[in-house]
Amino acid sequence: MELRTATLPELKTVYETLLRPAFPPAELKPLRAMTEMLEDGCYDPLVLVEDGEITGACFLWMGVPGWTLLDYLCVSPTRRGGGAGGEILRMMQELYAGWVILGESESPTEAPDTAMAERRLGFYARNHALLAGYDSEAFGVRYKTLYWSDGPVSDEDLMLQHRFIYESRFGAEKYAKYMRIPLNPDAPPLPVVPWDQ
């Protein structure tokens, strides 16, 4: 079993077979955006390979050195519930030892499926994710902010790097229109729009 960077053909296959069925359209980047980010060197689509078969993936969106955002985590339906997701997270932390890895998980209070959102948060907590002291919103979807690191990190540092990852890709105008880091809990929700607006 190994976790390694996907080739471009593997990225396309994983997108169609694992990501597209597992994520709602509002949460899924277009494949074109992922391939551009990979070519630009700011994306690391890691795949879990077992006996020559891709059975899971975690895609990382790179920030400044030492910081990254877990963009997607997905496991093949045949491997769900068997510990593959936790193994991917463990291997991801080994590959990126010493880094702060940010994560986002849909907020249960806003999610269409509250029980699923709560299970995801529980899964991340069991796999050593720490809960940051702020939430975020991207393209109308509200998230709890998580992170993995060797020790506690201040919310100010987390927010600074979290904002940088998005703003460096989108630019200030698009960021201001579609992103909120941190999210003011009293703010009205942004409209849900496709990621590539």
Image (cartoon, helix red, strand yellow):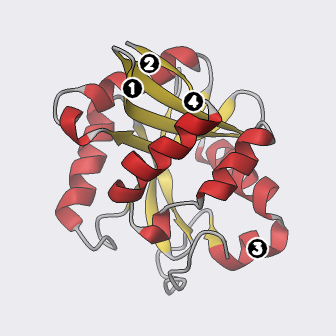
Coordinates of residue 1 in the picture (x, y in percent): 37, 12
Report the front residue among 138 and 133: 138
Q: Are marks 1 and 2 in contact (CB under 8 Å)?
A: yes
Which three-letter amino acid code belongs to the residue tagged 1? Ile
Q: Which residue is mark 4?
A: 6
Is residue 153 among the parts visible in the rendering?
no
Number of marks in picture: 4
User: Residue 91 has which mark?
Assistant: 2
Which three-letter amino acid code belongs to the residue tagged 3? Lys
Coordinates of residue 67 in the picture (x, y in percent): 67, 34
User: Residue 37 has which mark?
Assistant: none
The nearer-to-camera label among 4 and 1 is 4
* Label 2 – label 3 distance at C-alpha: 34 Å
Q: Are marks 4 and 2 in contact (CB under 8 Å)?
A: no
* Label 1 – label 2 distance at C-alpha: 5 Å
Q: First in sequence, mark 3 or 1: give its number.
A: 1
* Label 3 – label 1 distance at C-alpha: 32 Å
Mark 2 neighbour class, 10 Å CA radius: few under 14, some 14 to 19, many 20 or more: some
Which three-letter amino acid code belongs to the residue tagged 4? Ala
